[in-house]
Image (tube, rainbow, N blue to C red):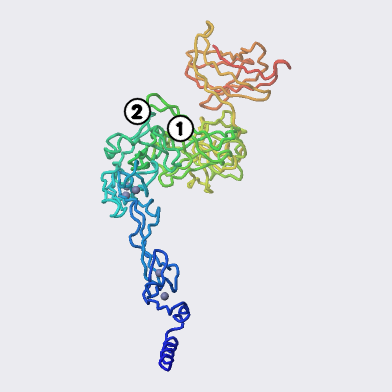
Amino acid sequence: MTKKKSIFAFALAACLAVPAMFMLSACGKHEHSFSSDWSQSETQHWHECTDKKCNEKQDLAEHEFVWEVKTPAGVHTDKVETGTCSICQYQKDRTVEGSGANIHSWVWKANDTKHWQETTCEHETPLKQNEQDHTWEYTSEGELTHKRQTNCGAEKHATRIESNIPHRYTDVNDVDCNDCGYVRSLTGKGSFNAIAAKTYNAGAQGVALSDYTVDEKIKDLCEIQYKVKGANDSTYTTTAPTNAGTYEVRIYCKGNATYLKGEVAKTDYVIKQIEVRVGISFIKEKQTTSNNYITLETYEVTNPSLPSNVTLTLRAYGEQYKNQGRYSIAKTNGEFEGLEFDNKNFKPIPNKSTLSISIVVYTNEAPVVTGTNQTESNVNWIGYVTPPYPTITMYQITTGTLRVGDYLICEGVNIPLKVKDIKLNKGSVSGSTSSSCLNIALAGETVDISFETPGFTENDAKTKLLNKTFTKVDYEVLKVQTSLSGKNYTNNSSEKLLNVGECRYLEFTVTIIQSTTFTIYPSDYAGGYAGENAYAVFDKTTGKPIATAGVNTFTLSESGTYTLVLKLTKTAEASASVSSKPISFYVSW
Ligand SMILES: [Zn+2]
Ligand SMILES: [Zn+2]
Ligand SMILES: [Zn+2]
Ligand SMILES: [Zn+2]
Ligand SMILES: [Zn+2]
């Protein structure tokens, strides 16, 4: 017993000594003894009892797989994974279905414009992906072309290089190449030679081919354009200018895909005015006009370069000319400002060298000339010429306009005195500082007057002309006419309207060989009556009256040549209904 007890005790001790887990399952028919090695099936693992006859399984459980890639998915090949049980290290493989279905083998392809990937694996139609335009880098090759090369990446395709590609611009105004940035320009593509000044010739005068050069390559794109210098560029035209002036001319490129649109070269040239010689002084009656100029003179121009004669009117611009006065246009910078023709293709040039142009504007009103406070000092007797004549100084033009050639009469003088010369008096009694007045004196001016004084002596001048008031009279030197209406008429006068009280003087010259009686006939071409007239006849040489025998007759008894002055005064109208008729006169003998 003791022995058994000790075995039991040993067994008990052994039981106590083994781990509790063994003990728990060791409560069958026999004491199981489980292998420490794992037994495995495809799905499970366990510990087997070492007793071959015992089927007891300890720690039976599903594998706890940890999956790792064995072979990754490939082209049309599914991924294979290997699972390892984290408990028992059991391993098995599995395939991830479909994981390789969308994996293809790709190859890069390229054409001129694009690159893309294409499948090389089995497909009825190859698949494409990543199709893109090439990425190009552009580099200018010069004025006309650029080259480009791809920069898509070496993995896609080899670098493609294309040369001699024309630059690309948006339009003719686009300056820089849309691809490479090359800046195009017309600089240096043309130039003008110095263009000689032209002169107006009534025809268009543009530049000649020899006046400019232009790059052959753009020649056909270019045209010559003109505008008035300083005018807006929008006024450029291909029509060459005709009128005198300064013009801007340019070579203009119309532009195309290669060449820029714009100005190639520009210069100026002048079409000069034709110079026309004009007077240096103008005496004009005051003009009633709204124009801002006074009309001075008309010129007929004949010039070999002109197709026909041109009639020009010379003007002086300025509001001042609306008023009576004495004006001067000074030469300033070589020009007489405001002196222009109505046709600007012609330029007035004084016919003498002068520093100023004189313009006198007068009113057409008969002058009244008055002398006051004058003494003999106011008479200069010019006795060394034949016939001698007096100059009387410091007369006032009270009203109207006095001109050389006017005939003046004053109290105590029978025959009107012809004004031989007028000077502007500057305050000198002797007239030594007097200056030219262009043969005309205006109201308000102080003048020295030289008279033709037939029959006068120096003493006559000093007694008859000082401190007098002179008025202008109508005086006509008759022209000889003969054989009018079958009669031996002569000295027909112009018609002249006379009012009652007005007179006119008619000068005529006759030669007689014996005593002759003359008859004065007033004529009346208008069919009415001339009215009544009084006649007086004077010998111009002596200033003395010739006695008249009748109302309209007078007799010269000595043979000789006589210059006579007939004074005719209208005393009455013929009737109330035919007043102020124009009448003419003739004298017969
Ligand atoms: Zn067992
Ligand atoms: Zn396991
Ligand atoms: Zn494929
Ligand atoms: Zn590419
Ligand atoms: Zn370019």
Which residue does the image show at 65% across and 25% down from the upper left? 502
Q: Is residue 271 left or right of residue 367?
A: left
Residue 44 image position (x, y, % from top left): 42, 67
Question: Which kind of residue does numbered mark 1 sit on?
Answer: Asn
How many residues crowd mark 2 within 10 Å: few (<14), some (14–19), many (20+)?
few
Question: Mark 2 to mark 1: distance in Å?
Answer: 16 Å
* Residue that badge 2 annotates: 305
Q: Is residue 50 left or right of residue 570?
A: left
Q: Earlier in the sequence, mark 2 or mark 1?
A: 2
Q: Vertical placement of 384 versus 89: above or below?
A: above
Q: Vertical placement of 301 versus 247: above or below?
A: above
Q: Vertical placement of 139 versus 218: above or below?
A: below
Q: Secondary structure at mark 2?
A: loop
Which residue does the image show at 69% across and 18% down from the upper left? 579
* Residue that badge 1 annotates: 343
Where's the C terminus, which quadrant? top right
How many residues crowd mark 1 within 10 Å: few (<14), some (14–19), many (20+)?
some
| Farthest-out residue, front | 1
Where's the N terminus, which quadrant? bottom left
